[in-house]
């Protein structure tokens, strides 16, 4: 039997409560507004280890509220939403899918794979379902904007920045719709970005976007998509080195950090492909080469035998070898291996060749020939320009470093261009006997399996391009 | 719409209802006879007959005045229990709901707001209806306050009906207030740029068949392009393939239209990129076989506005008088060889309608591309109704759902205590609302293949534990045969229960309202009215007999 009176029992409970309050306060006191204010043990550990909500990025009040409201059922709710998102995707209910993705990230704002996966879903899978290129572009943007929001919530995840660079750079610049996508990135076809409401082209509503503004959320300065991508890749590298301790789980570090420099090459190459053979393009190639060799090439990357530099001199590698306690041969071996992995020599050669005046001229001629045929239907002018360009192109391919461009196996851009140009030439002269000898013929008809493979691929690509013109 | 809408057949529904009621009554009667014979021996059947007669007299001699008095009493009691406080939560939700909905894109903004209102109203009122109806009678029995009623000349059936009406009255009052507040909130909260999305389109659907690429008519399906979702069938471009829609164009509201508004929602499937920047195109062909006319309108093909959120972009206005300037009028087949040139102008209704039906064929006009469609993807769009009309109908459906819940809850509370009644009604809600789709899918799979994919409950548990997939065969032994046998019995039981548990999903008009459609009478409004009545009648009878036989002194 309990001999305590009711009052005594209540006092005992009160004492117990006060005793228990002490460790609770000691452990759980929240973080104060200023660093000087007293904070609990858990709050201290949280801020020491950078585990607080605010240390990940901006805190979304709606997300925090949602998490609180759901108590312990957040996981169940998130799983149900993932299931729903999957259902919506298979039912092609895109606007609802995006809304569901928004709900998922409310519940899992710092699970960065959600942002990456759903953004990818919108930009790649959903956009491909649409028939109109403008709609496809709209959904690519939706994906990119979604990812951007994820970056704001997770400022210290370098992978998200890298994905953003890929969305803006490669999704827009490498896809089949790239010619239109790249233009849309600077002149958004959405009527909300119309500058003046005046029809721009010849009154055709489908082309009424030529003087539109860019979507300021993704391209505030109206830059080329590759230059914007370059900024994102650069930020990915910065975050990787400053916040993530050099750790990312997307791809080999050496490839991850090449982003900004490859983007600059993409930019220069896109300009050449679009017929912009001016000083800006030449300088872009020059800068790309310089950064590739002297910025990227001088970065240190980890290998099994310590750090190496892709473009490190023997002396630099010797110093690294002494620092890491390995031999120079080890360093040279791993440098060569990493160079192969990144096609380092090939990309340097590409920049070097593309900025040569004779190569610029060759490309200019070939572009003029292509345009004369595809846009004006002028076969005579097209043949004339193409033959001149092809001759110059062949000369460079065969003479540059004793045919290095034809022999090397790292990249095939030059051979692909050669094959496609010959295909265009043959298509212009279809039904007519071709001359016995014409420039690039030896390359086009080369029986080497490498050449045959590239030719077959070029033929497939060429027929697709011709069909969609 | 991404689902097909099948109108109810009231006669067939009534037949099915009668069958279920008779079967249920027979089961109850047999159980009652068995129990009575166990308890009273050979006198049992006589007692059952007497009880049946008493119950019938009880039900037949109800007085509306007494029912009204009991309903009023129930209503007052509920209000006194501060039930209406739930509206405070509702107001709180609406004060902060904007946090979660504001700042998002304008596209389908109205839809999100509408879904929010409907969901909030529904899931706030359902628990109230369940708790009120399940706990009212048992609490009265426990507190013996029911004695003050049953000692008066009030019949048991009047008590049950009075309770149902009283609780329903409370629910309707709350629903009315919430509906008004919700509507005002919608008008104020939906961004101005998205208010045009608050519409109530009135569609008239037709029947659908396909013509294959070789020209074979009356095919049920088109081509399957490999989509997981097989809702739409596809036709191949630049072939004989057509989707054939036949509409009943004899209704006065259709005939009164000067111009026919056709709204479509087709899907493109490309086998090649096609011309970059251009849509896949299609055409409408109006066909009258008896007069040998085939009219392509408009003359040039229509670009598919795939997934366009604004429905106006997918509307084709067909003028009543079709002339050769904007349409391609031809004789059908070889008829023109002997008939001379076709007329310059045709009247949509007089020349192209055949026995009151209008046949429209859809062709895909891009070679190598495919056009996908389902029955609800093409419809006549009658003049839109105000959004308020669809909103009221939607809330009406929700109101009937609450009445049904109150009916079921009150009935359950006549034979079990409050917590058990709540559990029972909760299970009904779970099966009838949340799990209904899964249940129907499993039963359909059982009808098609003899068993659901991956087996029933026990087999599924076995497969999860052994990390086995849904398709691999189970080892043939006594254990697996036993669990499969038990699963089969469970499925059969679920098949029977499917008819006793209402499909609560049909009461929810949100899919229509949120997508800008009016709530159709034959597809939604009539079925929910009939379902509610269909459950009210047997529930009243069951409730009366249960209350008659219940020991009201028991705690």
Image: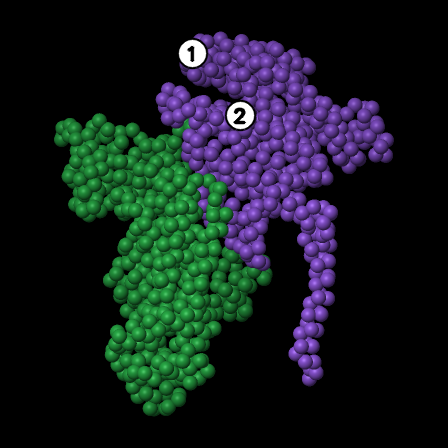
Chain colours: A purple, B green
Mark earlier in primary sequence (1, 2): 2
Asked where in the image residue A468 lies, by quadrant, the reply is top left
* Residue B507 visible in image: no
Q: CA distance from mark 1 to mark 2?
A: 35 Å
Chain label for disc 2: A
**Residue shown at 71%/52% (left/top)?**
A39
What is the x, y in percent for residue B308? 39, 38
Camera-near label (1 vs 2) is: 2
Q: Is the residue A387 above or below the residue A195 in the image? A: above
Q: Is residue B100 left or right of residue B151?
A: right
Asked where in the image residue A70 lies, by quadrant, the reply is bottom right
Q: Is the residue B249 above or below the residue B478 in the image? A: above
What is the x, y in percent for residue A133? 44, 31
Query: What residue is shown with label 1?
Result: A378
> Residue A186, which numbered label?
none
> Residue A222, which numbered label?
2
What is the x, y in percent for residue A79? 54, 53
Chain label for disc 1: A
The answer to whether marks 1 and 2 mark residues whose Cβ atoms lie closer than 8 Å is: no
**Residue shown at 41%/73% (left/top)?**
B136
In front here: B171 or A152?
A: B171
């Amino acid at each position: 039997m309990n001999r305590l009176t009711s009052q005594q029992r209540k006092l005992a409970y009160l004492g117990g409560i006060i005793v228990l309050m002490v460790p609770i306060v000691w452990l759980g006191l929240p973080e104060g507004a200023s660093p000087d204010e007293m904070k609990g043990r858990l709050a201290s550990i949280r801020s020491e280890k950078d585990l607080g909500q605010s240390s990940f990025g901006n805190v979304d009040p709606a997300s925090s509220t949602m998490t609180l409201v759901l108590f312990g059922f957040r996981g169940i709710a998130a799983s149900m939403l993932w299931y729903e998102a999957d259902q919506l995707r298979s039912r092609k209910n895109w606007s609802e899918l995006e809304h569901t993705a928004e709900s998922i990230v409310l519940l899992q704002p710092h699970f960065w794979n959600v942002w990456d996966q759903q953004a990818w879903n919108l930009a790649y899978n959903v956009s491909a379902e649409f028939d109109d290129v403008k709609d496809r572009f709209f959904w690519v943007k939706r994906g990119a904007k979604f990812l951007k929001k994820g970056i704001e919530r997770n400022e210290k995840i370098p992978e998200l920045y890298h994905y953003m660079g890929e969305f803006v750079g490669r999704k827009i610049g490498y896809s089949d719709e790239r010619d239109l996508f790249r233009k849309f990135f600077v002149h958004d076809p959405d009527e909300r970005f119309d500058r003046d409401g005046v029809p721009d082209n010849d009154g055709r509503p489908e082309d009424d976007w030529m003087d539109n503004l860019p979507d300021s959320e993704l391209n505030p300065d109206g830059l080329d998509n590759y230059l914007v991508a370059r900024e994102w890749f650069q930020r990915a590298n910065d975050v990787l080195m400053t916040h993530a301790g050099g750790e990312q789980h997307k791809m080999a570090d050496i490839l991850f950090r090449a982003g900004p420099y490859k983007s600059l090459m993409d930019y220069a190459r896109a300009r050449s492909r679009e017929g912009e053979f001016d000083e800006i393009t030449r300088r872009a190639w020059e800068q790309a080469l310089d950064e590739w060799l002297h910025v990227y090439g001088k970065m240190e990357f980890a290998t099994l035998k310590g750090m190496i530099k892709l473009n490190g001199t023997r002396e630099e590698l010797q110093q690294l070898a002494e620092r890491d306690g390995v031999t120079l041969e080890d360093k040279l071996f791993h440098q060569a291996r990493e160079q192969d992995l990144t096609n380092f020599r090939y990309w340097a050669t590409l920049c070097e060749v593309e900025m040569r005046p004779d190569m610029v001229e060759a490309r200019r001629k070939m572009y003029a020939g292509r345009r004369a045929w595809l846009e004006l239907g002028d076969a005579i002018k097209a043949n004339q320009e193409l033959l001149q360009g092809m001759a110059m192109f062949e000369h460079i391919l065969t003479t540059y470093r004793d045919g290095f461009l034809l022999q090397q196996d790292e990249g095939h851009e030059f051979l692909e261009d050669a094959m496609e140009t010959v295909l265009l030439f043959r298509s212009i002269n279809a039904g007519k006997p071709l001359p016995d000898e014409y420039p690039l013929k030896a390359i086009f008809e080369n029986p080497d399996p490498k050449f045959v493979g590239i030719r077959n691929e070029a033929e497939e690509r060429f027929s697709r391009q011709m069909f969609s013109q | 719409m991404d689902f097909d809408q099948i109108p109810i057949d009231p006669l067939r529904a009534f037949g099915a209802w009668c069958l279920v009621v008779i079967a249920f009554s027979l089961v109850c009667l047999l159980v009652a006879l068995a129990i009575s014979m166990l308890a009273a021996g050979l006198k049992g059947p006589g007692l059952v007959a007497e009880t049946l007669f008493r119950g019938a007299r009880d039900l037949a001699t109800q007085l509306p005045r007494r029912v009204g008095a009991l309903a009023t009493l129930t209503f007052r009691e509920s209000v006194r229990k501060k039930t209406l406080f739930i509206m405070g939560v509702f107001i709180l939700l609406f004060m902060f709901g904007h946090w979660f909905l504001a700042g998002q894109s304008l596209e389908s903004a109205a839809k999100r707001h509408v879904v929010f209102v409907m969901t909030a109203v529904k899931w706030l009122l359902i628990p109230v209806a369940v708790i009120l109806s399940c706990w009212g009678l048992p609490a009265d029995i426990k507190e013996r306050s029911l004695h003050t009623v049953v000692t008066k000349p009030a019949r048991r059936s009047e008590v049950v009906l009075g309770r149902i009406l009283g609780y329903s009255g409370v629910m309707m009052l709350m629903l009315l207030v919430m509906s008004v507040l919700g509507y005002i909130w919608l008008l104020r909260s939906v961004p101005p740029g998205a208010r045009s999305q608050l519409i109530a389109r009135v569609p008239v659907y037709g029947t659908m068949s396909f013509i294959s690429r070789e020209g074979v008519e009356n095919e049920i399906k088109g081509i399957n392009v490999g989509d997981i979702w097989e809702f739409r069938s596809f036709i191949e471009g630049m072939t004989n393939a057509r989707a054939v829609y036949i509409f009943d164009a004899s209704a006065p509201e259709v005939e009164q239209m000067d111009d026919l508004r056709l709204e479509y929602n087709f899907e493109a499937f490309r086998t090649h990129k096609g011309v970059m920047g251009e849509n896949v195109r299609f055409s409408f062909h109006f066909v009258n076989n008896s007069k040998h006319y085939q009219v392509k309108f408009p003359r040039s093909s229509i670009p598919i506005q795939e997934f366009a959120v604004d429905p106006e972009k997918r509307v084709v206005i067909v003028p009543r008088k079709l002339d050769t300037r904007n349409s391609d009028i031809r004789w059908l087949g070889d008829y023109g060889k002997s008939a001379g040139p076709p007329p310059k102008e045709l009247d949509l209704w007089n020349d192209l309608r055949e026995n009151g039906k209008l046949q429209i064929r859809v062709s895909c006009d891009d070679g190598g591309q495919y056009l996908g469609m389902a029955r609800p993807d093409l419809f006549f769009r009658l003049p839109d109704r105000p959004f308020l009309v669809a909103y009221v109908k939607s809330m009406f459906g929700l109101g009937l759902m609450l009445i049904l819940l109150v009916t079921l809850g009150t009935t359950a509370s006549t034979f079990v205590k409050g917590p058990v009644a709540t559990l029972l009604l909760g299970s009904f809600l779970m099966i009838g609302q949340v799990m209904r789709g899964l249940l129907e899918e499993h039963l359909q799979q059982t009808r098609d293949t003899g068993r659901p994919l991956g087996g029933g409950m026990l087999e599924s548990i076995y497969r999860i534990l052994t990390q086995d997939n849904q398709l691999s065969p189970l080892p043939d032994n006594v254990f697996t045969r036993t669990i499969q046998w038990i699963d089969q019995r469970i499925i059969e039981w679920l098949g029977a229960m499917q008819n006793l548990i209402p499909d609560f999903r049909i009461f929810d008009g949100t899919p229509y309202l949120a997508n800008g459609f009016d709530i159709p009478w034959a597809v939604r409004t009539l079925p929910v009215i009939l379902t509610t009545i269909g459950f009210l009648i047997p529930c009243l009878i069951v409730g009366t007999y249960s209350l008659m036989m219940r020991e009201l002194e028991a705690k």
